[in-house]
Each structure stands twice: as structure tokens, then as C-alpha cells.
Image (cartoon, grey):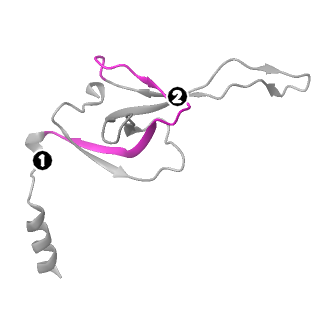
Amino acid sequence: MIERDVLDGDFVLIQHTDFPYPEYGKIVVIERLGEEEGMGAWTLKQLVLEQSSSFSRNEFGDELDFENPSILLRGHNPQFRSWLLDPSSQYRVRGVLLRSLRAEEAHLVDSDMLRRFGTEVQ
């Protein structure tokens, strides 16, 4: 995601959602499932819908023999290739990228401190 200013070592904020439909054009967190549990890969990619141009029309102008569009997971880092989704459903959309933070911009805190702070405020 170099071209989108997301660099190696950055923290990313993502919105986790169970997606009933893909959000085309968005940068998403994709899980590519592996053969065994825990052997998959996670990545940031842009969902791109590529319309097929191969169809014919009947005498009424209706489209016939229309091929379903392809879904391409486009990377914005020239060192990594894009993924074309296959019909085997080996991919899951896990979330949408909201923003990224450089490591020096992020201030990490202990989760116990957050819990204590939450109870003090109430």
C-alpha cells in the first residue's frame, strides 16, 4: 500500500464487519485461507470490480451469455502482485481500512490501564 501512504511498520485502524456484500473501491483487510487452520495470509488490498466485455445481445437488445464480472484485489505496492478472486471462496473480507498511523505517531497503552480508567470515569 505504498502508493496509498501505508508503510511497513505502520499501525492501521480497521473497521471489522461481517460484510454481506463487498465494498468495491475500498481498501480492505483480506484473509486468504490456507490449506490448514492458521496457515493463511492477511493483506490490505483494494477491491476492484472488472466488468467483462464479452456478451452478445438478442434481437430485443437484451444481454445474452453475460459473464460475471471478476473481482480483483489490487495491491498498491509494486513489489506485490494483485490477486484475482477465484470462485472457490478462499478469501474473506475482514474489515475496511479507516486510516494508518506511523509508529512514532501512535502511543500504545496497557489494556489494564484502559480498564482502570474506564471504571474511574463511571
Residue at image point 65% right, 29% down: 68
Badge 2 local density, few (<14 within 10 Å), some, or many (20+)?
few
Q: What number is the disc on residue 65? A: none
92 falls in the magenta region = yes
Q: Of the residues tagged 1 and 2, which is closer to the observer?
A: 2
* Quarter holding residue 12: top left
Q: Is residue 56 left or right of 3 when viewed as pictured?
A: right
* Residue positioned most to the bottom: 122
Q: Which residues are magenta?
A: 77-102
The three-letter code of the residue at mark 2 reads Asp
* Quarter holding residue 118: bottom left
Residue 113 in the image: x percent, y percent?
8, 67
Q: CA distance from mark 1 to mark 2?
A: 37 Å
Q: Secondary structure at mark 2?
A: loop
Q: Is residue 15 above or below residue 7?
A: below
Q: What number is the disc on residue 106? A: 1
Of the 4 image quadrants, the one containing the N terminus is top left
Residue 63 in the image: x percent, y percent?
79, 26
Numbered marks: total: 2
Badge 1 local density, few (<14 within 10 Å), some, or many (20+)?
few
Q: Is residue 65 left or right of 34 when viewed as pictured?
A: right
Residues 100 and 72: in front is 72
Q: Is residue 83 left or right of 4 when viewed as pictured?
A: right
The three-letter code of the residue at mark 1 reads Ala
Q: Secondary structure at mark 1?
A: loop
Q: Is residue 40 left or right of 23 when viewed as pictured?
A: left
Residue linked to disc 2: 86
Of the 4 image quadrants, the one containing the C terminus is bottom left
Residue at image point 38% right, 45% down: 96
Residue 111 in the image: x percent, y percent?
12, 63
Residue at image point 31% right, 20% down: 80
Residues 65 and 40: in front is 40
